[in-house]
Amino acid sequence: MTVRQPAVAGTFYPDDPAILQKIVSNMLQETEQRDLSPKALIVPHAGYIYSGPVAASAYQLLEPFHDNINRVVLLGPSHQVAFEGLALPDADHFMTPLGSIHLDRPAMAALSRFSQVQTLSQAHAREHSLEVQLPFLQTCLESFSLVPLVVGNASALVVAEVIDFLWGKEDTLIVISSDLSHYHSYEEAQRRDNLTVKAIEQLTTDLTGGQACGCCPINGMLKVAQRRGMEVQTLDVRNSGDTAGDKQRVVGYGAFAIQ
């Protein structure tokens, strides 16, 4: 059994299980309660003090379905390794301070039919974009298996093909991990992010890295949403200047539900 150990516990989020559980639970309780039934979420992936409250606005939607969702397909951008296509890990479990998550190995093996999917452990080893989502999922869902995909340079079409294949039924949730703009002034970030939010709401599939670091998985997800006649609901848009940082160079965060 191969286990991917957490790489950013103790930096992006607490490595103490009791503290981590309390922080995640508090963020979920403090967010605005909405009555939506999302098939997919777009959530940010910075340190919890920065983007955690924004991510919580999406994850709290899962509460009514905590024992209905038993598989999560999680896609996020690569920050550490440059590659083409999508990358699976060579692992059977992902570990966090809250425990072990079983990977859906049969689904991962079935992805071998796609030339754009490869197994690339180094793409997962230090990647935070997927890891920071896991404690939220462990808190919100009763039990689930995971299909983790780090997305490199990939078109909307090839990402959409993989998402469509893994779509499943009501028991499968799709999660896309992405921040918005990076390192602009507070006012400039607000201007840019507001335009990006409108583009996401309009199911635009040509977002760039300057708009969202997870543009490739977002574009693929929105391509699927177009085909399936789905809608995007914006839940929260803020930046690090609103949460825990200064307002000179900020990072933008958005949370969205797709249904």
Image: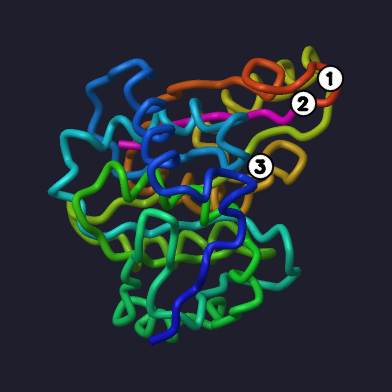
Q: Residue 185 carries which label?
A: 1
Residue shown at 14% from the left, 49% from the top: 68
Q: In which quarter of the image is residue 239?
A: top right
Instruction: Please identify the dominant SS of the magenta region.
Output: strand
Pick whichever, 19 or 2, lies toward us: 19
Quote the CA–CA distance across marks 2 and 3: 19 Å
Rendered view: 193 above or below 8: above
> Percent x, y for residue 90?
50, 83
Residue shown at 44% from the left, 31% from the top: 256
**Upstream in the sequence, badge 1 or badge 3?**
1
Quote the CA–CA distance across marks 1 and 2: 6 Å
Q: Does dot 2 land on a helix, a strand or a loop?
A: strand
- Taking 111 as reference, is 180 left or right? right
Q: Does dot 1 land on a helix, a strand or a loop?
A: loop
Residue wearing tag 3: 207
Callout 1 touching callout 2 (CB < 8 Å):
yes
Q: Residues within 10 Å of mark 1 (few under 14, many from 20)?
A: some
**Upstream in the sequence, badge 1 or badge 2?**
1
- Taking 177 as reference, is 85 left or right? right
Whether 251 is among the magenta residues is yes
Quadrant where the image shows the N terminus: bottom left
> Which one is closest to the eye, mark 1 or mark 3?
1
Task: Tell me which amino acid carries mark 3.
Answer: Leu
